[in-house]
Amino acid sequence: MENISSSSENSSGTFRTLGVTVAPVGQDVGQVEVDGLGLPLKVFFCLAMACVLLLAFLGNVVVCVMVYRRAAMRSAINILLASLAFADMMLALLNMPFALVTTVTTHWVFGKAFCRLSAMFFWLFLLEGVAVLLIISVDRFLIIVQKQDRLSPRRAKTLIVVSWTLSLCLAFPLSIGYPTLQMPPRAPQCVFGYTDERGYHAYVLLIVLVFFFVPFSVMLYTFVGILGTIRHNALRIHSNSDSICLGQAGKLSLTGLRRPFNINIDMSFKTRAFTTILILFSVFTVCWAPFAAYSLVATFSSSFYTSRSFFEISTWLLWLCYLKSALNPLIYYWRIKKFRDACVDLMPKYCKILPEFSGNTRRRIRPSTVYACAEHRSVV
Protein backbone atom coordinates (compact mmCIF):
# COMPACT_ATOMS: atom_id res chain seq x y z
CA MET A 1 0.00 0.00 0.00
CA GLU A 2 1.25 3.39 -0.94
CA ASN A 3 2.13 5.77 1.87
CA ILE A 4 0.81 9.22 1.01
CA SER A 5 1.99 11.15 4.06
CA SER A 6 5.34 12.02 5.55
CA SER A 7 5.70 8.81 7.52
CA SER A 8 8.18 5.99 7.67
CA GLU A 9 7.63 2.29 7.17
CA ASN A 10 8.43 0.15 10.19
CA SER A 11 9.78 -3.40 10.19
CA SER A 12 6.33 -5.05 10.36
CA GLY A 13 5.23 -3.48 7.08
CA THR A 14 2.63 -1.12 8.54
CA PHE A 15 2.35 2.61 8.01
CA ARG A 16 1.49 5.42 10.39
CA THR A 17 -0.65 8.04 8.74
CA LEU A 18 -2.51 10.87 10.47
CA GLY A 19 -1.73 9.29 13.84
CA VAL A 20 -3.42 5.98 12.94
CA THR A 21 -1.56 2.73 12.38
CA VAL A 22 -2.76 1.20 9.11
CA ALA A 23 -1.83 -2.24 7.89
CA PRO A 24 -1.90 -3.28 4.25
CA VAL A 25 -5.09 -4.93 3.16
CA GLY A 26 -5.19 -8.56 4.18
CA GLN A 27 -2.81 -8.29 7.13
CA ASP A 28 -3.77 -8.51 10.77
CA VAL A 29 -4.62 -5.11 12.17
CA GLY A 30 -5.33 -6.03 15.72
CA GLN A 31 -3.05 -3.26 16.99
CA VAL A 32 -4.55 -0.47 14.92
CA GLU A 33 -5.45 2.61 16.89
CA VAL A 34 -9.03 3.63 16.29
CA ASP A 35 -11.58 5.79 18.00
CA GLY A 36 -14.33 3.44 19.12
CA LEU A 37 -17.79 4.46 20.16
CA GLY A 38 -18.41 6.23 23.43
CA LEU A 39 -20.55 4.63 26.11
CA PRO A 40 -23.76 6.53 25.21
CA LEU A 41 -23.40 5.53 21.55
CA LYS A 42 -22.68 1.93 22.51
CA VAL A 43 -25.86 1.77 24.58
CA PHE A 44 -27.85 3.36 21.76
CA PHE A 45 -26.45 1.01 19.15
CA CYS A 46 -27.02 -2.03 21.35
CA LEU A 47 -30.70 -1.21 21.77
CA ALA A 48 -31.26 -0.08 18.19
CA MET A 49 -29.35 -3.00 16.65
CA ALA A 50 -31.16 -5.53 18.82
CA CYS A 51 -34.51 -4.16 17.63
CA VAL A 52 -33.41 -4.15 13.99
CA LEU A 53 -32.06 -7.70 14.30
CA LEU A 54 -35.22 -9.11 15.91
CA LEU A 55 -37.57 -7.32 13.53
CA ALA A 56 -35.55 -8.30 10.47
CA PHE A 57 -35.42 -11.95 11.51
CA LEU A 58 -38.94 -12.48 12.88
CA GLY A 59 -40.71 -10.31 10.31
CA ASN A 60 -39.08 -12.01 7.34
CA VAL A 61 -39.64 -15.46 8.87
CA VAL A 62 -43.37 -14.68 8.93
CA VAL A 63 -43.26 -13.70 5.23
CA CYS A 64 -41.52 -16.95 4.26
CA VAL A 65 -43.85 -19.10 6.37
CA MET A 66 -46.99 -17.50 4.93
CA VAL A 67 -45.92 -17.96 1.31
CA TYR A 68 -44.89 -21.55 2.05
CA ARG A 69 -48.05 -22.55 3.95
CA ARG A 70 -50.72 -20.71 1.95
CA ALA A 71 -51.35 -21.69 -1.66
CA ALA A 72 -53.28 -18.46 -2.24
CA MET A 73 -50.13 -16.46 -1.45
CA ARG A 74 -47.96 -18.20 -4.06
CA SER A 75 -48.33 -15.72 -6.88
CA ALA A 76 -45.27 -14.78 -8.90
CA ILE A 77 -44.74 -11.50 -7.04
CA ASN A 78 -45.19 -13.12 -3.62
CA ILE A 79 -42.68 -15.84 -4.49
CA LEU A 80 -40.16 -13.14 -5.37
CA LEU A 81 -40.93 -11.27 -2.16
CA ALA A 82 -40.42 -14.53 -0.24
CA SER A 83 -36.95 -14.85 -1.80
CA LEU A 84 -36.21 -11.28 -0.75
CA ALA A 85 -37.49 -12.05 2.76
CA PHE A 86 -35.31 -15.17 2.94
CA ALA A 87 -32.22 -13.15 1.98
CA ASP A 88 -33.05 -10.52 4.63
CA MET A 89 -33.70 -13.24 7.22
CA MET A 90 -30.33 -14.90 6.54
CA LEU A 91 -28.61 -11.53 6.66
CA ALA A 92 -30.09 -10.99 10.13
CA LEU A 93 -29.03 -14.48 11.22
CA LEU A 94 -25.51 -14.74 9.77
CA ASN A 95 -24.26 -11.14 9.84
CA MET A 96 -26.04 -8.84 12.26
CA PRO A 97 -25.19 -10.63 15.55
CA PHE A 98 -21.46 -10.67 14.80
CA ALA A 99 -21.48 -7.04 13.66
CA LEU A 100 -23.30 -6.14 16.89
CA VAL A 101 -20.64 -7.84 19.04
CA THR A 102 -17.84 -6.17 17.08
CA THR A 103 -19.51 -2.76 17.35
CA VAL A 104 -19.44 -3.03 21.14
CA THR A 105 -15.98 -4.61 21.54
CA THR A 106 -14.27 -2.96 18.50
CA HIS A 107 -12.48 -6.29 17.94
CA TRP A 108 -13.29 -9.23 15.69
CA VAL A 109 -13.13 -12.31 17.90
CA PHE A 110 -14.47 -14.88 15.45
CA GLY A 111 -11.33 -15.61 13.42
CA LYS A 112 -10.05 -14.62 9.98
CA ALA A 113 -11.73 -17.48 8.12
CA PHE A 114 -15.18 -16.61 9.45
CA CYS A 115 -14.54 -12.94 8.72
CA ARG A 116 -14.10 -13.77 5.04
CA LEU A 117 -17.12 -16.07 5.11
CA SER A 118 -19.21 -13.40 6.80
CA ALA A 119 -18.25 -10.90 4.10
CA MET A 120 -19.31 -13.38 1.42
CA PHE A 121 -22.70 -13.89 3.10
CA PHE A 122 -23.16 -10.14 3.46
CA TRP A 123 -22.67 -9.39 -0.22
CA LEU A 124 -24.53 -12.52 -1.33
CA PHE A 125 -27.70 -11.53 0.51
CA LEU A 126 -27.43 -7.88 -0.52
CA LEU A 127 -27.00 -8.80 -4.19
CA GLU A 128 -29.96 -11.19 -4.07
CA GLY A 129 -32.17 -8.53 -2.51
CA VAL A 130 -31.26 -6.07 -5.26
CA ALA A 131 -31.89 -8.71 -7.93
CA VAL A 132 -35.41 -9.39 -6.63
CA LEU A 133 -36.31 -5.69 -6.59
CA LEU A 134 -34.96 -5.36 -10.13
CA ILE A 135 -37.03 -8.30 -11.38
CA ILE A 136 -40.22 -6.95 -9.79
CA SER A 137 -39.61 -3.46 -11.19
CA VAL A 138 -39.11 -4.78 -14.72
CA ASP A 139 -42.25 -6.91 -14.36
CA ARG A 140 -44.30 -3.86 -13.33
CA PHE A 141 -42.86 -1.97 -16.31
CA LEU A 142 -43.89 -4.74 -18.72
CA ILE A 143 -47.39 -4.91 -17.24
CA ILE A 144 -48.13 -1.19 -17.09
CA VAL A 145 -46.16 0.24 -20.01
CA GLN A 146 -45.91 -2.68 -22.45
CA LYS A 147 -49.25 -4.33 -21.48
CA GLN A 148 -47.47 -7.69 -21.19
CA ASP A 149 -48.02 -10.01 -18.24
CA ARG A 150 -45.20 -12.53 -18.68
CA LEU A 151 -44.21 -13.36 -15.13
CA SER A 152 -45.69 -16.67 -13.98
CA PRO A 153 -44.88 -18.49 -10.72
CA ARG A 154 -42.73 -20.96 -12.67
CA ARG A 155 -40.74 -18.19 -14.34
CA ALA A 156 -40.40 -16.43 -11.01
CA LYS A 157 -38.83 -19.56 -9.50
CA THR A 158 -36.44 -19.83 -12.46
CA LEU A 159 -35.40 -16.19 -12.06
CA ILE A 160 -34.82 -16.75 -8.35
CA VAL A 161 -32.47 -19.67 -9.06
CA VAL A 162 -30.59 -17.62 -11.65
CA SER A 163 -30.29 -14.58 -9.35
CA TRP A 164 -29.00 -16.66 -6.42
CA THR A 165 -26.45 -18.34 -8.70
CA LEU A 166 -25.14 -15.06 -10.12
CA SER A 167 -25.01 -13.47 -6.66
CA LEU A 168 -23.03 -16.43 -5.33
CA CYS A 169 -20.58 -16.23 -8.24
CA LEU A 170 -19.90 -12.56 -7.48
CA ALA A 171 -19.59 -12.98 -3.71
CA PHE A 172 -17.79 -16.33 -3.49
CA PRO A 173 -14.24 -14.98 -4.17
CA LEU A 174 -14.42 -13.10 -0.87
CA SER A 175 -14.64 -16.38 1.06
CA ILE A 176 -11.35 -17.66 -0.36
CA GLY A 177 -9.41 -14.48 0.32
CA TYR A 178 -9.56 -12.66 -3.00
CA PRO A 179 -9.70 -9.83 -2.82
CA THR A 180 -8.33 -9.72 0.70
CA LEU A 181 -10.41 -7.75 3.16
CA GLN A 182 -9.56 -5.44 6.03
CA MET A 183 -10.51 -7.04 9.34
CA PRO A 184 -11.82 -5.04 12.30
CA PRO A 185 -11.10 -2.89 14.31
CA ARG A 186 -11.16 -0.60 11.28
CA ALA A 187 -14.90 -1.35 10.91
CA PRO A 188 -17.55 -3.45 12.68
CA GLN A 189 -17.12 -6.23 10.10
CA CYS A 190 -14.80 -7.20 7.24
CA VAL A 191 -14.85 -4.38 4.69
CA PHE A 192 -13.03 -3.24 1.59
CA GLY A 193 -9.94 -1.29 2.63
CA TYR A 194 -7.71 1.25 0.93
CA THR A 195 -5.21 -0.14 -1.55
CA ASP A 196 -3.53 0.79 -4.82
CA GLU A 197 -3.99 -2.63 -6.46
CA ARG A 198 -5.81 -2.28 -9.77
CA GLY A 199 -7.33 -5.75 -9.57
CA TYR A 200 -8.73 -4.91 -6.16
CA HIS A 201 -10.17 -1.66 -7.48
CA ALA A 202 -11.73 -3.48 -10.43
CA TYR A 203 -13.49 -6.00 -8.17
CA VAL A 204 -14.84 -3.29 -5.85
CA LEU A 205 -16.10 -1.28 -8.82
CA LEU A 206 -17.76 -4.38 -10.29
CA ILE A 207 -19.54 -5.44 -7.12
CA VAL A 208 -20.69 -1.90 -6.27
CA LEU A 209 -21.97 -1.33 -9.81
CA VAL A 210 -23.89 -4.62 -9.75
CA PHE A 211 -25.04 -4.04 -6.17
CA PHE A 212 -26.35 -0.50 -6.52
CA PHE A 213 -25.64 1.79 -9.45
CA VAL A 214 -26.80 -0.39 -12.37
CA PRO A 215 -29.98 -1.66 -10.62
CA PHE A 216 -30.74 1.86 -9.43
CA SER A 217 -30.49 3.23 -12.97
CA VAL A 218 -32.67 0.48 -14.44
CA MET A 219 -35.31 0.76 -11.71
CA LEU A 220 -35.36 4.55 -11.97
CA TYR A 221 -35.95 4.26 -15.73
CA THR A 222 -38.80 1.77 -15.24
CA PHE A 223 -40.49 3.89 -12.58
CA VAL A 224 -40.28 7.05 -14.68
CA GLY A 225 -41.87 5.15 -17.58
CA ILE A 226 -44.58 3.71 -15.33
CA LEU A 227 -45.46 7.09 -13.84
CA GLY A 228 -45.66 8.61 -17.32
CA THR A 229 -47.98 5.84 -18.50
CA ILE A 230 -50.24 6.15 -15.46
CA ARG A 231 -50.47 9.90 -15.94
CA HIS A 232 -51.27 9.48 -19.64
CA ASN A 233 -54.00 6.91 -18.92
CA ALA A 234 -55.50 9.12 -16.22
CA LEU A 235 -55.77 12.03 -18.69
CA ARG A 236 -57.43 9.75 -21.27
CA ILE A 237 -59.93 8.50 -18.69
CA HIS A 238 -60.96 12.00 -17.65
CA SER A 239 -61.16 13.12 -21.29
CA ASN A 240 -63.38 10.17 -22.25
CA SER A 241 -65.55 10.74 -19.21
CA ASP A 242 -66.14 14.40 -20.10
CA SER A 243 -66.97 13.63 -23.74
CA ILE A 244 -69.42 10.89 -22.75
CA CYS A 245 -71.22 13.17 -20.31
CA LEU A 246 -71.55 15.93 -22.96
CA GLY A 247 -72.71 13.52 -25.67
CA GLN A 248 -75.41 11.98 -23.50
CA ALA A 249 -76.65 15.20 -21.91
CA GLY A 250 -80.03 15.10 -23.67
CA LYS A 251 -80.65 11.47 -22.84
CA LEU A 252 -79.69 12.00 -19.21
CA SER A 253 -82.20 14.83 -18.92
CA LEU A 254 -84.98 12.54 -20.18
CA THR A 255 -84.14 9.50 -18.13
CA GLY A 256 -83.44 11.43 -14.96
CA LEU A 257 -81.88 8.87 -12.65
CA ARG A 258 -80.49 6.39 -15.22
CA ARG A 259 -76.86 6.74 -16.44
CA PRO A 260 -76.04 4.98 -19.73
CA PHE A 261 -72.33 4.66 -19.04
CA ASN A 262 -70.50 4.45 -15.75
CA ILE A 263 -66.81 5.31 -15.84
CA ASN A 264 -66.02 5.33 -12.16
CA ILE A 265 -62.29 4.52 -12.08
CA ASP A 266 -60.48 3.80 -8.83
CA MET A 267 -56.96 5.01 -9.63
CA SER A 268 -55.66 4.14 -6.17
CA PHE A 269 -56.68 0.50 -6.72
CA LYS A 270 -54.92 0.43 -10.09
CA THR A 271 -51.65 1.78 -8.80
CA ARG A 272 -51.53 0.20 -5.35
CA ALA A 273 -49.19 -2.68 -6.27
CA PHE A 274 -46.88 -0.33 -8.15
CA THR A 275 -46.86 2.10 -5.22
CA THR A 276 -45.72 -0.69 -2.91
CA ILE A 277 -42.78 -1.49 -5.20
CA LEU A 278 -41.98 2.23 -5.44
CA ILE A 279 -41.83 2.45 -1.64
CA LEU A 280 -39.49 -0.57 -1.52
CA PHE A 281 -37.31 1.12 -4.14
CA SER A 282 -37.22 4.36 -2.12
CA VAL A 283 -36.18 2.49 1.04
CA PHE A 284 -33.54 0.61 -0.97
CA THR A 285 -32.10 3.90 -2.23
CA VAL A 286 -32.04 5.65 1.14
CA CYS A 287 -30.54 2.69 3.03
CA TRP A 288 -28.02 1.36 0.52
CA ALA A 289 -26.83 4.39 -1.46
CA PRO A 290 -24.66 5.72 1.44
CA PHE A 291 -23.10 2.28 1.96
CA ALA A 292 -22.27 1.93 -1.75
CA ALA A 293 -20.60 5.33 -1.79
CA TYR A 294 -18.79 4.51 1.46
CA SER A 295 -17.35 1.30 0.01
CA LEU A 296 -15.96 3.16 -3.00
CA VAL A 297 -14.50 6.02 -0.98
CA ALA A 298 -12.88 3.65 1.53
CA THR A 299 -11.18 1.76 -1.30
CA PHE A 300 -9.87 4.78 -3.21
CA SER A 301 -9.29 7.40 -0.48
CA SER A 302 -6.46 6.86 1.98
CA SER A 303 -7.32 9.95 4.03
CA PHE A 304 -10.89 8.75 4.58
CA TYR A 305 -9.88 5.18 5.37
CA THR A 306 -7.19 6.21 7.86
CA SER A 307 -9.28 8.78 9.70
CA ARG A 308 -10.01 8.14 13.37
CA SER A 309 -13.76 8.52 12.79
CA PHE A 310 -13.81 5.72 10.20
CA PHE A 311 -15.13 3.14 12.70
CA GLU A 312 -18.03 5.33 13.78
CA ILE A 313 -18.92 6.23 10.18
CA SER A 314 -18.75 2.55 9.24
CA THR A 315 -21.09 1.63 12.07
CA TRP A 316 -23.73 4.19 11.17
CA LEU A 317 -23.72 3.32 7.46
CA LEU A 318 -23.60 -0.44 8.03
CA TRP A 319 -26.63 -0.44 10.30
CA LEU A 320 -28.47 1.92 7.97
CA CYS A 321 -27.90 -0.76 5.35
CA TYR A 322 -29.22 -3.43 7.73
CA LEU A 323 -32.28 -1.29 8.53
CA LYS A 324 -33.80 -2.09 5.13
CA SER A 325 -34.18 -5.74 6.10
CA ALA A 326 -36.27 -4.70 9.10
CA LEU A 327 -38.41 -2.19 7.21
CA ASN A 328 -39.49 -4.53 4.40
CA PRO A 329 -41.90 -6.65 6.55
CA LEU A 330 -43.46 -3.45 7.91
CA ILE A 331 -44.04 -2.23 4.37
CA TYR A 332 -45.68 -5.53 3.44
CA TYR A 333 -48.01 -5.28 6.45
CA TRP A 334 -48.86 -1.68 5.67
CA ARG A 335 -49.47 -2.08 1.94
CA ILE A 336 -50.63 -5.68 1.30
CA LYS A 337 -54.01 -6.64 2.76
CA LYS A 338 -53.54 -10.37 2.19
CA PHE A 339 -50.34 -10.17 4.18
CA ARG A 340 -52.13 -8.39 7.01
CA ASP A 341 -54.92 -10.94 7.03
CA ALA A 342 -52.42 -13.80 7.07
CA CYS A 343 -50.52 -12.19 9.95
CA VAL A 344 -53.72 -11.86 11.95
CA ASP A 345 -54.65 -15.49 11.26
CA LEU A 346 -51.24 -16.71 12.42
CA MET A 347 -51.38 -14.85 15.72
CA PRO A 348 -53.29 -16.06 18.77
CA LYS A 349 -56.45 -14.09 19.51
CA TYR A 350 -55.02 -12.45 22.61
CA CYS A 351 -52.05 -11.15 20.59
CA LYS A 352 -54.03 -9.43 17.85
CA ILE A 353 -53.10 -5.89 18.74
CA LEU A 354 -51.69 -4.76 15.39
CA PRO A 355 -53.57 -1.89 13.71
CA GLU A 356 -55.89 -2.66 10.81
CA PHE A 357 -55.75 -0.85 7.46
CA SER A 358 -58.47 -0.65 4.88
CA GLY A 359 -57.81 -2.20 1.52
CA ASN A 360 -59.38 -3.86 -1.51
CA THR A 361 -59.15 -7.64 -1.78
CA ARG A 362 -60.32 -8.10 -5.38
CA ARG A 363 -57.98 -10.45 -7.24
CA ARG A 364 -56.69 -9.52 -10.68
CA ILE A 365 -56.36 -12.55 -12.96
CA ARG A 366 -54.48 -10.59 -15.61
CA PRO A 367 -52.71 -7.59 -14.06
CA SER A 368 -51.90 -6.11 -17.47
CA THR A 369 -55.60 -5.52 -18.20
CA VAL A 370 -55.86 -3.20 -15.21
CA TYR A 371 -54.00 -0.54 -17.15
CA ALA A 372 -55.84 -0.99 -20.49
CA CYS A 373 -58.02 1.95 -21.44
CA ALA A 374 -59.94 1.64 -24.70
CA GLU A 375 -62.30 4.16 -26.25
CA HIS A 376 -65.53 2.66 -24.90
CA ARG A 377 -64.33 0.67 -21.89
CA SER A 378 -61.93 0.74 -19.02
CA VAL A 379 -60.96 -2.41 -17.13
CA VAL A 380 -60.16 -2.25 -13.44
Image (tube, rainbow, N blue to C red):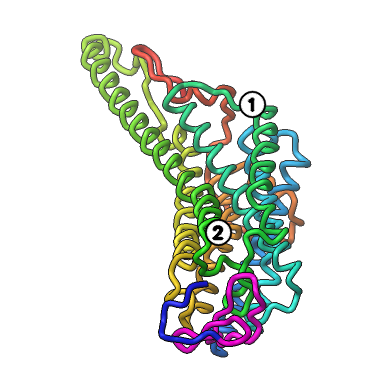
Q: Is residue 174 left or right of residue 277?
A: right
Which residue type does callout 2 highlight? Tyr
- Of 158 and 69, nearer the camera is 158
Which residue is rendered at x = 70% and y = 27% of the image? 154
Residue 152 - label: 1
Q: Is residue 267 left or right of residue 103?
A: left
Give the magenta range: 10-36
Is residue 15 rendered magenta in the image? yes
Counting from the top left corner in percent of width and height, residue 327 is at 56, 58
- Residue 265 x/y as whole percent: 39, 28
Q: CA distance from mark 2 to mark 1?
A: 40 Å
- Could you tell me which secondary element the residue under label 2 belongs to? helix
Q: Quadrant of residue 22?
A: bottom right
Question: Quick check: is 225 in the magenta stretch?
Answer: no
Q: Nearer the viewer, residue 123 or 146?
A: 123
Q: Is residue 222 visible?
A: yes
Determine which of the numbered discs, if any, sits on residue 220 in the image. none
Residue in view at x 51 percent, y 49 percent: 280
Residue 201 drawn at (x, y percent): 51, 58
Crowding at dot 1, Cα within 10 Å, few <14 / some 14-19 / many 20+, comes out as few
Tell me the element at label 1: loop
User: What's the residue at 67%, 29% (across, down)?
Assistant: 153
What secondary structure predominates along the stretch shown in magenta? Answer: loop
User: Sequence-wise, which precedes: disc 2 or disc 1?
Assistant: 1
Image coords of residue 176 (percent x, y): 72, 58
Check disc 2 and report the residue beneath it: 200
Looking at the picture, does residue 138 appear above or below residue 357? Answer: above
Q: In this orientation, which residue lies closer to the viewer: 101 or 108?
A: 108
Q: Amino acid at mark 1?
A: Ser
